[in-house]
Amino acid sequence: MTARIIDGKALAESIRNKVAAEAAELKRSHGIVPGLAAVLVGENPASQVYVRNKVKQTTEAGLASFEHVLPAETTQDDLLALVRQLNADPKVHGILVQLPLPPQIDPDLVIATIDPAKDVDGFHVENAGRLVVGQESLVPCTPQGSVLLAKTVHPDLTGLEAVVLGRSNIVGKPVAQLLIAESATVTVAHSRTRDLEAVCRRADILVVAVGRPEMVKGSWIKPGATVIDVGINRVPGENGKSRLVGDVDFKEAMEVAGAITPVPGGVGPMTIACLLANTLKAAMVANGLTPPSF
Amino acid sequence: MTARIIDGKALAESIRNKVAAEAAELKRSHGIVPGLAAVLVGENPASQVYVRNKVKQTTEAGLASFEHVLPAETTQDDLLALVRQLNADPKVHGILVQLPLPPQIDPDLVIATIDPAKDVDGFHVENAGRLVVGQESLVPCTPQGSVLLAKTVHPDLTGLEAVVLGRSNIVGKPVAQLLIAESATVTVAHSRTRDLEAVCRRADILVVAVGRPEMVKGSWIKPGATVIDVGINRVPGENGKSRLVGDVDFKEAMEVAGAITPVPGGVGPMTIACLLANTLKAAMVANGLTPPSF
């Protein structure tokens, strides 16, 4: 058996295209251009690449991009002042502060200062709370992308056994909440779980977000299961080069799973696509309009 | 095998005693008396009994009780005005609006209007969000009581398989989050789960909150498991009288489980005890003091 590969690049592109079409219509009919402000503090190379990608995809979708690059020694007060200024700016509908932040800045305080209505990363406790109780909210992008990918295989997740491996606030927990809302039977497993392998093997849908290269082996996967691999790990490759691998042993999983996301090209591209969708949504809600679903 | 009966009345009493001792010390050392405002709209007999019990136990623990009973035809605006007045009242540290509310009033709006720092029911989205991300919060009382009862059997829940049957915002979901924070492996099961019986039988700790009298049978329980029965259902009894039963078939469960909460006398008494503990906590936090843990 060879698993079907779930094409995250293609789904992300179709979401970006839908965002672009909706944004064009919003501009035409209401003169509104959704705006995303990205704040980068310091010179983390990975963050720089990521923010550059966001800016590029934001403008390509016809959204306005406002980039704020601050020096590594920026004080917490100065960053909070910028966030408040962006909260008050009517051209800015989404604010994203790239993590990690330098050690002199408390990330929880920064996130708490972002207007929840502009919190397109979905990390504010108000959005976390709205998600868990089922109120309309801005949903974290990677979890949203993971579930959209699972739904390309199972349009209806009702009653399926889902196992989420990892209980982080930014991936594992929101994925679990989204799957509960989709009426799956959801198990949250983690490093303290006894017999992790057996628990994972119960899953019709296995979402892995642990940040450990190729930890999940073929024997952990129920034959025919759908595997969503959120991990992106850089490991030594051939000829002194590095390569990217997921949290799942892709080669082994391909022999057992029914469908699987590759790394790269699976969950990764979905994150920015969902960020753009959230920015569109925030702009529409801010103007009293009903956003489309994705 | 006969299960050990988990004595919720005794644990609730010890919590109330601890609240009373801490409240006495707080009054002596800081002149602060924690105050709980209970708001009852209309004449739901069950709610009246419940609020009367709360008032009694509140004053017995040395806390101040402020009871507001409003007519069934109270407008939403009038109720919101009262909530705002209680938010501003420095003698009131905890506010509880008894549900259900009459149909002209939106309960979500009322809960959203309560100051999260005084939301001793833990239903505000800010407290729901703080609970899920692991920030200090006011935790819903029945879920907190359920987990405290489970911990009388397993002081360390790490790695245990927990199954929460029911996914309501007021019980199932917060119980699941508390158990995840305790490092249990947590499955949320519900009416759409396939083979509910088999899923429940995986549980070392089974928490049932479905509101269906005696739905969980002995065959659903893993031998030796701990069963926390959140249900309180009134059913016809002998001689035309009614009697209270849980969501678990107690007689059957007694033969299989290792420990089980009875109904009444299990989770029920814990709810008000945890409410008083939350009120003490809210009063201490409001005054910059560190509350004790329970």
Image (tube, coloured by chain):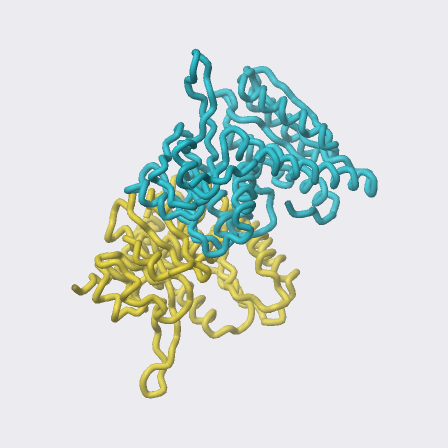
Chain colours: A yellow, B cyan
Q: Residue furthest left?
A: A1
Q: Residue furthest front?
A: B1
Q: Quadrant of residue B247?
A: top left
Task: Judge by depth and name the residue closer to the eye, B155 or A47.
Answer: B155
Tell how many labels.
0
Q: With respect to residue B255, does B238 lie above or below?
A: above
Viewed as shown, does residue A40 lie left or right of B192? right
Location of the N terminus of chain B by quadrant is top left
Residue A82: x %, y % from top left: 59, 58
Residue shown at 47%/69% (left/top)?
A47
Task: Judge by depth and name the residue closer to the eye, A268 or B152.
Answer: B152
Residue A123: x %, y % from top left: 50, 53
Residue B99: x %, y % from top left: 53, 26
Q: Quadrant of residue B198?
A: top left
One can see residue A257 in this view = yes
Task: Judge by depth and name the residue closer to the eye, B64 or A53.
Answer: B64
Residue shown at 36%/35% (left/top)?
B217
Residue A69: x %, y % from top left: 53, 67
Q: With respect to residue B146, does A41 lie above or below?
A: below
Location of the C terminus of chain B by quadrant is top right
